């Protein structure tokens, strides 16, 4: 197919004619006008002309080093007629320019515009040719003024214009500015400088001192022109501009575009040996035998591990990713043999690997001619590594990583420690952070691309110091959530350590994805969260409910990367069965879970929250209450949560965890969904078209109590413990900070469980932007009330000068609800419901 390019004379009555060039396919157009010297873009249009983006364009801006005076289209003139050609379904138009005067600048500049049949977006790239060595500090691939509302931008982010158009560089480290040409400022997005983030100082060279209202700029920092064919050349990153058709939400339109270039979402379950001391020895069949033990346990449940992953330690640290002779005396041949043995058993081999050789012996490398990267102040807190862009290491790593993937038949790489910071001299870029960042990123992307070419099906996961650019997903399947490895969040009172771990993960996600007005475009489902951690034999006796809640929340986030950091001596059959059930459930609802968004408040301040993912007219909501008091979670029923159906339609809800039964409410699209969550409850709800049953849903019997405070300020509660207990029945007491002494019927009580605050307990390398100003010291205790089932008791709280709260948490028998369709989740039963009641 050949897209149509038309050159026509467009003129108003009695006005001088203007030459116009339309670059278009069947869906989108870019219109340029010739002023006698150059071609300038005047507007973008949908194919039918109904969507219009009017612009006043300079097309580009070239900023040399150590200068604020740059070159724009006005410094050039067209060298020849536009050149049009087609390749398969892609149509191109190339315009060549020469400078108006002899300067130290380029002697030729080529702009290529191109569009693919059927796509609602159009692209542009630039080649700058010099007849001498040259350096470009900043290259703006698009530079225009537009009078419509603008938002977004940042590092690796698009700009949205009038809720109908998007524009950006298809590059994770492209920088977009809008509104006044300088918004957002560097690290100005809500989620930019949070957690384990990457910091690169642009030294103000991203700033346009003559910024104008409505100015949009898409830029990067290329550095040195590369010698090529008798000249020196800089090739820009590719700019893309597209639109939302037929009233589509602009975020949804951008995601539709992203789906045409990203790595397709795929689920991957892997075991990682990082926390498992019993699986560190990789000699002979030892690692295969580890897998066989897991296989024997999980195979009867109908699930499997897709990959077995040795973490840091498999490699020779005095090498560029050669296998350790301790485990692999014959090098690559032994590694390949391990891979074959695992494959024969029904799984595959993956590897941990840092592209910059972080954790290796850098002194050995420097002694062997590999250049060490010069870290900035921020990255100097952490380990040393090589410069990816330095010639010797670049050549070696571009050859070695794909070779490993191919020789060892790998299914997965966990690419850790992506510093991508180098301000060193002699490493093929100007000695600045911004140019070293781009040069090192370019090599990292080449490694990812070459690896995928060598093994097209391989999964690639990028961890520390990435950032949430959607354009990473052209190269990687998963991105690290930028948290600590295994944090315990003790800001809000909880008794369960697993609950505290869940709160830690979800607080990081809230901080970065919880603001609907300014959140990343990377789907939550593409995050690496460090998976399921169960590695201590002391954890083997965890309650089944605590375990199930923990596993359900991990999978309920929608995470496609399902990492198991699980030790066999920390598990028992009931835990495996629950994990297997949740794994199968996640596979059944993968389409819904792929689309999850965060809803609710900050978890470690006790707010109800969750994740909802829509697939057409069905959603999965995984919700959690990290507090003792019953809360209502409010969820927008509109495009902000991924619902794109018509308003005014009725939807019913069915709870599928922790029980299986209907929810007593009908919800109307366009209006908020509200779900009641008892204290410390985790709940999974399926939403579908329909109305709630008219018959009354089973509710637990009410709890009667009376609390009083005497003249000595001693509090006392008289409460009747329910007789229909099925499960937990506990008195929960929270002191701020001290706990009162508790007695029942004048008998002193000893708590079964206790916990205490760990305020703002974030890993030092991931604490940025995370601390809560509302967290306050606390202690918590849980007392078993089951011995008093069906009896009225008198609870006295001594030392009531202290601030404290008390609750009763009880799970009660109710008439059994009819089970729904297939449900693999580990439900506690259809005849039990939880309630929490505050006593004091």
Image (cartoon, rainbow, N blue to C red):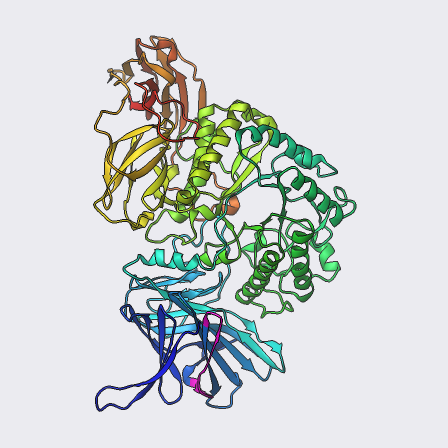
Q: Is residue 504 visible?
A: no
- Residue at 53% of width from left, 32% of height from top? 302
Q: Is residue 676 visible?
A: yes
Looking at the image, the residue that sits furthest to the front is 1
Q: Could you tell whether 370 is left or right of 594 in the image?
A: right
The span shown in magenta is: 75-90
Residue 115 highlighted magenta (yes or no): no
Q: Is residue 629 above or below residue 35?
A: above
- Residue at 41% of width from left, 43% of height from top? 593
Q: Tag count in the figure?
A: 0
Q: Is residue 120 above or below residue 101?
A: above
The N terminus - image quarter: bottom left
Q: Could you tell whether 687 is left or right of 386 in the image?
A: left
Q: Position of residue 49 (x, y in %)?
A: 28, 71
Q: Position of residue 445 (x, y in %)?
A: 56, 60
Instruction: Examine the image and state in which quarter residue 182 appears.
Output: bottom left
């Amino acid at each position: 197919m050949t897209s149509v390019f038309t050159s026509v004379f467009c003129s108003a009555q009695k006005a001088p004619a203007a030459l116009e060039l339309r670059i278009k396919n069947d869906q989108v157009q870019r219109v340029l006008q010739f002023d006698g010297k150059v071609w300038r873009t005047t507007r973008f249009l949908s194919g039918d002309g109904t969507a219009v983006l009017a612009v006043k364009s300079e097309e580009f801006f070239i900023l040399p080093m150590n200068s604020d005076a740059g070159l724009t289209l006005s410094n050039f003139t067209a060298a020849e007629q536009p050149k049009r050609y087609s390749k398969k379904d892609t149509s191109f138009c190339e315009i060549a320019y020469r400078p108006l005067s002899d300067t130290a600048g380029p002697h030729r500049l080529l702009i290529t515009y191109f569009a693919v049949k059927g796509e609602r977006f159009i692209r542009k790239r630039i080649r700058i040719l010099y007849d001498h060595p040259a350096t470009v500090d900043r290259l703006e691939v698009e530079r225009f003024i537009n009078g419509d509302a603008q938002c977004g931008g940042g590092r690796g982010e698009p700009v949205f214009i009038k809720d109908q158009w998007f524009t950006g560089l298809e590059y994770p480290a492209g920088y977009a500015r809008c509104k006044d040409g300088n918004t957002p400022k560097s690290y100005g997005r809500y989620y930019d400088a949070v957690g384990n983030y990457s910091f690169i100082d642009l030294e103000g060279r991203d700033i346009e001192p003559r910024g104008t209202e409505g100015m949009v700029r898409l830029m990067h920092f290329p550095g040195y022109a590369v010698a090529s064919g008798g000249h020196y050349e800089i090739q820009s990153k590719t700019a893309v501009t597209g639109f939302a058709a037929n009233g589509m939400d602009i975020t949804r339109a951008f995601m539709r575009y992203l789906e045409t270039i990203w790595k397709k979402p795929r689920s991957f379950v892997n075991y990682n040996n990082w926390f498992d001391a019993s699986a560190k020895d990789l000699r002979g069949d030892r690692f295969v035998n580890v897998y066989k033990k897991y296989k024997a346990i999980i195979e009867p449940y109908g699930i499997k591990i897709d990959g077995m992953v040795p973490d840091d330690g498999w490699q020779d640290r005095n090498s560029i990713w050669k296998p350790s002779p301790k485990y692999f005396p014959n090098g690559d041949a032994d590694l390949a043999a391990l891979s074959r043995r695992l494959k024969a058993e029904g799984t595959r081999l993956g590897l941990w690997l840092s592209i910059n050789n972080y954790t290796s012996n850098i002194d050995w490398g420097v002694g062997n001619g590999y250049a060490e990267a010069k870290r900035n102040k921020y990255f100097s807190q952490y380990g040393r590594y090589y410069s990816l862009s330095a010639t010797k290491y670049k050549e070696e790593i571009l050859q070695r990583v794909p070779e490993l993937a191919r020789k060892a038949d790998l299914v997965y790489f966990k690419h850790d420690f992506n510093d991508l910071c180098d301000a060193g001299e002699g490493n093929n870029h100007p000695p600045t952070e911004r140019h070293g960042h781009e040069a090192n990123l370019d090599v990292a992307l080449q490694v990812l691309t070459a690896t995928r070419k060598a093994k097209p099906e391989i999964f690639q996961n990028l961890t520390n110091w990435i950032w949430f650019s959607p354009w990473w997903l052209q190269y990687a399947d998963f991105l690290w959530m930028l948290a600590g490895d295994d944090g315990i969040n003790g800001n809000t009172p909880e008794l369960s350590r697993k609950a505290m771990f869940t709160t830690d993960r979800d607080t990081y996600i809230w901080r970065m994805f919880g603001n609907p007005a300014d959140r990343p475009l990377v789907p939550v489902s593409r995050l690496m969260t460090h998976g399921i951690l169960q590695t201590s034999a002391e954890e083997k006796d965890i309650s089944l409910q605590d375990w199930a809640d923990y596993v359900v929340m991990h999978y309920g986030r929608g995470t496609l990367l399902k990492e198991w950091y699980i030790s066999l001596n920390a598990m028992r059959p009931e835990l495996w069965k629950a994990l297997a059930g949740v794994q199968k459930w996640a596979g059944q609802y993968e389409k819904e879970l792929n689309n999850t968004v965060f809803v609710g408040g900050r978890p470690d301040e006790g707010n109800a929250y969750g994740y909802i993912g829509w697939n057409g007219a069905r959603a999965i909501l995984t919700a959690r209450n990290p507090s003792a008091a019953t809360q209502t979670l409010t969820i927008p029923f509109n495009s902000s949560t991924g619902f794109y159906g018509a308003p005014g339609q009725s939807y019913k809800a069915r709870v599928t965890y922790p029980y299986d039964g209907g929810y007593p409410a009908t919800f109307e699209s366009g209006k908020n969904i509200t779900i009641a969550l008892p204290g410390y409850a985790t709940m999974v709800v399926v939403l579908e078209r329909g109305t709630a049953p008219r018959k009354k849903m089973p509710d637990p019997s009410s709890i009667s109590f009376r609390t009083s405070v005497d003249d000595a300020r001693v509090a006392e509660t008289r409460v009747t413990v329910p007789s229909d207990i099925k499960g937990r029945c506990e008195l929960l007491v929270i002191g701020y900070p001290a706990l009162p002494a508790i007695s029942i019927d004048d008998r002193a009580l000893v708590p079964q469980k206790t916990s205490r605050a760990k305020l703002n307990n974030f890993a030092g390398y991931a604490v940025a932007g995370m601390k809560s100003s509302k967290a306050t010291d606390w202690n918590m205790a849980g007392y078993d009330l089951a011995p008093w089932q069906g009896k009225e008791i008198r609870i006295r709280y001594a030392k009531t000068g202290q601030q404290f709260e008390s609750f009763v948490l009880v799970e009660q028998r109710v008439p059994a609800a009819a089970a729904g369709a297939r449900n693999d989740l580990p439900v506690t039963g259809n005849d039990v419901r939880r309630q929490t009641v505050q006593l004091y």
